[in-house]
Amino acid sequence: MRLEATFLLVRVDDRLLHGQVVYGWGQMISPRKYLIADDEVAADEWECEAFRSAAPPDVTVEVISLSAFAEAWVSLPDPSGTVVLLRGLPGLERLVKARFKVAAGVNLGGLHARPGTREILPYLHLTKDDEQLLRELLHNGYPLYAQDLPTSPRHGSKKLLGLIGT
């Protein structure tokens, strides 16, 4: 059983799979699979098909419920070519409670403006609960960083704590 996952990228992005992920990140890191871990999408076959059609033809898209992913991540075969996509920080929190640990860290790449959020970075808008969760994760040494595109500046743990306040 693996103690840390070696996924190509684990990204928190409220839009899940979209052009910035497919073209911005995909062309840079060349994934073999996008794995969307999301209860709502997994329950809607039409939405699953829409996301499958968003990927290049040579890249597989798998949709799985967050609960199923939390149980199965340690036993997934060769995750090194896989990009995991989560809709938001509550999903990441569920995975962390299931002892989900990612060797390369979790990318906070797209949490956009919505009621009750404040802008931390142009692509990172957080509620007070989101900020508290991030503080807890960062203070516990959980590897997180903010970066919308691979060519953009990467904001690591110390920078994130500075932005949200310790």
Image (cartoon, rainbow, N blue to C red):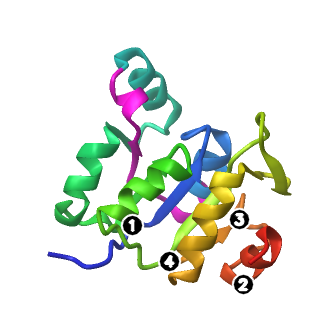
Element carrying mark 2 = helix
Could you tell me which residue is drawn at 61 percent across and 41 percent down?
14
Front-most of 127 and 83?
Answer: 127
Q: Which residue is mark 3?
A: 147
- Looking at marks 1 and 2 on the same chain, the residue that comes earlier in the sequence is marked by 1
Foreground mark, 1 or 4?
A: 4
In three-dimensional space, the C-alpha distance between marks 3 and 4, rounded to whole angstroms, equals 16 Å
**Highlighted range, magenta:** 27-43
Real-space CA distance between mark 1 and mark 4, rounded to the nearest whole angstrom: 16 Å
Mark found first going from the N terminus, 3 or 4: 4
Q: CA distance from mark 2 to mark 4?
A: 12 Å
Q: Can you tell which mark lies on residue 47?
A: none
Question: For the point 68% across and 60% down, which residue is it?
Answer: 131
**Cβ atoms at labels 3 and 4 below 8 Å apart:** no
For marks 2 and 3, the one nearer the N-term is 3
The residue tagged 1 is: 7
Badge 1: how crowded within 10 Å, few (<14), some, or many (20+)?
many
Q: Which of the two residues, 91 or 72, is positioned nearer the viewer here?
A: 91
